[in-house]
Image (cartoon, rainbow, N blue to C red):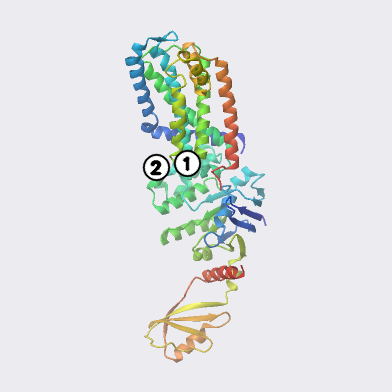
Amino acid sequence: MNPREQWISFLTILRREIHRFMRIWVQTLVPPVITMALYFIIFGSLIGSRIGTMSGFSYMEFVVPGLIMMAVLTNSYSNVVSSFYSAKFQHSVEELLVSPTPNYIILLGYVLGGVARGLAVGFIVTMISMLFTRLQVHHIGVTVAIVIMTSVLFSLMGFVNAVYANSFDDISIVPTFVLTPLTYLGGVFYSISMLPEFWQGVSQLNPILYMVNAFRYGILGVSDIHIGNAFAGVGVFIVVLFAYCLHLLRTGKRLRA
Amino acid sequence: MTLALSIKQLKKVYDNGFEALKGIDLEVKEGDFFALLGPNGAGKSTTIGILCSLVTKSSGSVSIFGCDIDSQFSEAKKLLGIVPQEFNFSPFEAVEKIVVNQAGYYGLPKALATERTEKYLKKLGLWDKRSTPARMLSGGMKRRLMIARALVHEPKLLILDEPTAGVDIELRRSMWEILKEMNAQGTTIILTTHYLEEAESLCRHIAIIDHGRIVENTSIKALLKTLNKEVFVLDLRETLANVPEVPGYRLRLVDEHTLEVEVEKGRSLNEVFAGLSQQGVHVVSMRNKANRLEELFVSRINAQEESA
């Protein structure tokens, strides 16, 4: 395929992915928005008003960046894992596998589809949050870069999960037992400076802590970690996972007999 | 003559150790209408799976119009259209969307993809259903959708894996006409089927695969010439109580109005009619008992099993 044909194929996959989550918007866009709105009401307005300030900001201001990031990463992940696994389950992935589309285009199409949903949900959640607090962006470059990189990373993770999954149960195990605990313990609702020293050290092993804090730095200008470490870590994970996903596609792991 | 398909020493051993293909060689010429026959589990679908890269081969080589499927991956795939045995499209997508997207995966610009989609959906009688989600189509329509999808990039080689399985007779005949027309326009077609009548009426060449080996590879005409006997069914005007005797022929009474006669190659049916007529038995109509190709197919498979 020449570059123009590859571009057409990429746009076809991306458009199809966006069309898919837009077609079922009641399942894909509405639930995370309702969940986040409830977080804003309960943790931000009702309980948050009694907590006082955190890192120099009201609790509502503090918690909003973490909740936006949480919405972005969970939706990026779940879009790719459910879309690619469904395609595998229905065998419609064969439409792509028999075509001349190169593996990296297939991967980019699915990953950017996940990014599109992650950012769409993130945007809606941001709009909702503005009903509760005034958002000021401290560093636009950091904010945009870290949200896109995180979305790419979690889309790639969703892809790996989809390739290995043998049933619909398998695509909910990782989000339930790995992502949710890591997200809740990743500094979304609190600053790790509140924790005893030992638990601060343990928390620093949680990759989501870096993403949430880098995003919070972009919005509020405060962070529990050095944001350079966040960018480096996310960047390295993206490169490694992208290469691994390509390897899975090339070898046909659980895709070709 | 250009070869549309060349398979050399193709082997496939699955992870569980099952040897599905034991080194097959096969050549299909450009413009041919070729049948690949074999019992269930013989290796037909594995072979097709390797051609379209859904199955990874263990060894051997495959080229499509001279393009190696490993080293000239992209060129080979553009030349190939596949209609699989099982439905493999998203049931939630609209018919038109499925075909347009497939065109996109082959790099066709939007305008051309839309034009070709309309052309093939109309040709296959699905244009009225273009906005219908695929899950709402009947079984026959779903098969036609897969053909339209396989044709949208206008491949030079079209492979159909049991395309008329579960399709009613009327629809099967209309699909035969479409396939004949495409072949007449220059598309090389390879067909796997369990309907041997289909292979006999459509195809010029045939290969029989069994236990991962090609056991026959010839023209349909040449194969039928090897048939050394045929069984005819004779419908009688009057009832018969006993089997009449005609020297040199074996007759069997099916019911009081029907006789079966076995005729060996080189012998004339006239002798049967003359013998029956002398005994006052009048034949009102006659037909082949079974599809001739079916008899050959069974004899080849049986011979293979006996020699194994």
Say few, some or many: other residues with alpha carbon within 10 Å of mark 2 (under 14 / 14 to 19 / 20 or more). Answer: few
Q: Position of residue B18 (x, y in %)?
A: 58, 55
Residue A206 lies left or right of residue A68; in this view the side is: right
- Residue drawn at point x = 66 percent, y = 48 percent: B68
| Residue where numbered disc 1 is placed | A87
Relative to residue B227, is residue A63 depicted above or below? above
Amino acid at pointer 1: Ala
**Image mark for residue B5:** none
Quadrant of residue B223 within the rendered picture: bottom right
Q: From where the camera sits, is residue B15 visible? A: yes
- SS class of the residue under badge 2? loop
Which chain does tag 1 point to? Answer: A
Question: What is the count of numbered marks?
Answer: 2
Relative to residue B14, is residue B216 depicted above or below? below
Nearer-the-camera pick, B184 or B260: B260
Quadrant of residue B108 within the rendered picture: top right
Q: Where is residue B131 in the image (x, y as percent from the top left)?
A: 39, 42
**Can you name the residue that lies furthest to the left here?**
A46
